[in-house]
Amino acid sequence: MGRVAGLLSLLLICLVPHLIARLFGASPIPPLFLAGTARICGARVRTVGQPLAPHSLLIANHVSWLDILVLAGATRTRFVSKAEVRDHWLLRWLADQNDTLYIERQDRRAVPAQAREVAEALAQPRPLVLFPEGTTGDGVTLLPFRPALLAAVAPAPPGTHVRPVAIDYGAMRRTLGWIDGESGKANALKLLGRSGSFPVIVRLLAPLPPDEDRKAMARDARAAIEAALDLTIAP
């Protein structure tokens, strides 16, 4: 219960300054809140690699809901999220505070419009993250990357950078993995109920070269992350 109390306290501390800042434009509070939340959950985050340039699209592996906390704290990024998040009022409110971009992953007809939304988001300096696996995994297997939304950067607009990012939980990979069949509530209670801390390395990998083939771009990003983490690639 100690972690839950810490999270509630952090939320109360951040809420009023955030709401006041939103009255005057963008708020700097959400990435700080998410970074603090990651730390309360036990994550001790370190970032390696060349710093991000403005207008960067990050392509990351997806292990756990902790990925969002870790990446936001390390890079101050926005996220591309599945539309189902909007069905839960609290998750939607929290995601909205960090200017999350929602997509309908099952609607192929929406891909061109969603690609335009991604391109418009990348016109802003703040980084944007895609989780192209489309779901979380067991922590030790890299699932196939879905290339559809990479249409916005195939080829990348001038000034845009595409960076694979490997979230490395080290020996905790399997423990933190959120696998199919496990409810969000069960996974959250499992992680919040454990004691101690664990290291996390956010590995900012080399930018991908420009490419008009989004499938090739997805393949190259997946290979770079697999090599950085020494994971198993699922067929």
Image (cartoon, helix red, strand yellow):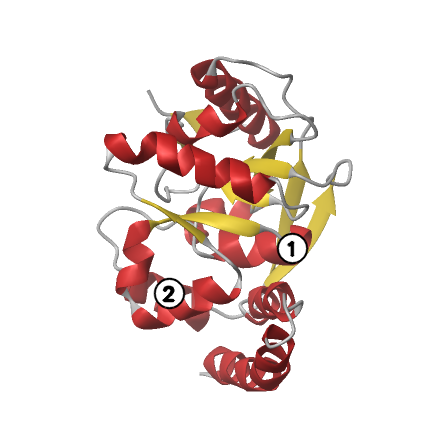
Nearer-the-camera pick, 200 or 154: 154
Residue at position x 55%, y 29% in the image: 225
Which structural element holds mark 2? helix
Determine which quarter of the picture holds residue 15: bottom right
Answer left or right for 10 relative to 82.
Answer: right
- Image position of 235 with respect to 200: above or below: above
The x, y position of residue 72, in whole percent, is 60, 56
Instruction: Look at mark 2 in the image and give the residue it sits on.
Output: 92
Residue at position x 53%, y 18% in the image: 220
**Separation of residues labelled 1 and 2 (CA atoms):** 18 Å
- The 10 Å Cα crowd at callout 1, few under 14, some 14 to 19, many 20 or more, is many
Residue at position x 67%, y 25% in the image: 158
The x, y position of residue 110, in whole percent, is 29, 35
Nearer-the-camera pick, 117 or 5: 117
Give, as a three-letter code, the residue at label 2: Arg
Task: Residue 222: tell me if it is visible.
Answer: yes
